[in-house]
Amino acid sequence: MSKNKKWIPVWGTVAVLLLSGGLAWAEPVDADPDAETKNDDQGTLAEYVKVDASAIPQSNTIATKLAVDSRLTPGIVGTVTSELFNEQQAENLSDILENVSGVNIQAQNGVHDFFYLRGFDSLSGSLVMVDGAAVPEATIYPTYNIQGVEVLKGPGGYLYGAQPMSGAVNIVRKQPVPNDFLSVELGGGSFGTYEGQVDWNQANDEGSLAFRLNGFYRESDGYRDNLSSEHRGVNPSFSFRINERSSINVNLEAIDASFSPDAGLPLIAMAPGFPAAIPNVDPETSYQSNLDYSDQTIQRVQVDYQI
């Protein structure tokens, strides 16, 4: 089931206003975003727009393995924050990467994320990482526990080995924080689609110990007959702060996915030199074999020591 998403970045909106002569300047503040008008020094009526720029990424870690300001990064990096892709209702990594230039998203029968980065496919010419650790591109990466995604473009991907000829993608997961909260989301859609997510965080009074649990479940009957899918995942994580500068983070994650691949409609072969034709058949009928299915189980254990 596909979704059409349209969005305009903050700076794109500002550029349009500048061209139309309706904006004098933009100030990134957390105050009331409503516009106000004043007369400038020349007596011309100007419109002042207050913009909250807190969701715009200011740094990354993929280019140097350390937190570096974006303007000082020695490389080309695309960064997408959770504020953006949550607003877009992104369901997987491919939905997030649609916001990054130079990345061409492919469906790959709907059983795992697949994309081209600067002309090289993600299976042979680039690398996917989770919190800086390389992982096999075996299934669809859900967004339930993703805080942000960083894309290092170009030969700088060799920082992580010989495979990423065109670049590397780093998935930054949500980590425990020193406060308490609980978030539950439920949703539904067409074709028998239902889903739910939970984000629960607990910490002690000093904030030295914290626990966070992210989980989700999604099922759908699919657009075509007999192409149902089921996807679930759970990610408990623990944080132990040793001192003001050092901490240990432990992440345990399990993902289970069951999909029926969708190869689309059959084609009628035409004469050489002529394109194949689509027959006049019901588009909601599946022509897949009952033996064609994809069952995947992913388990990850990661321990990070930060100083």
Image (cartoon, rainbow, N blue to C red):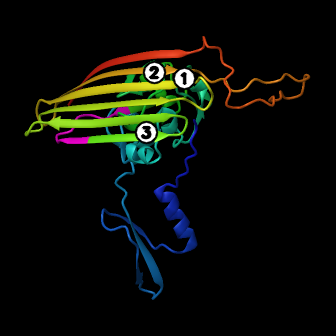
Mark 2–mark 3 distance (CA, rounded to whole Å): 38 Å
**Circles 2 and 1 in contact, beta carbons < 8 Å:** yes
For image coordinates 63% across by 29% down, the residue present is 224
Query: 15 or 160, which lies in front?
Result: 15
Sequence-earlier tag: 2 or 1: 1
Sequence-earlier tag: 2 or 3: 3
- Check disc 2 and report the residue beneath it: 257
Residue type beneath disc 3: Pro
In the image, residue 180 lies in the stretch drawn in magenta: yes
Q: Label for residue 111?
A: 1
Residue count near mark 2 (Cα–Cα under 10 Å), binned few <14, some 14–19, many ≥20:
many
Q: Label for residue 62?
A: none
Q: Label for residue 74?
A: 3
Q: Quadrant of the C terminus?
A: top left
Residue type beneath disc 2: Ala
Q: Is residue 127 visible?
A: no
Residue extending farthest to the bottom is 43
In the image, residue 245 lies in the stretch drawn in magenta: no
Residue extending farthest to the top is 291
Q: Is residue 10 visible?
A: yes
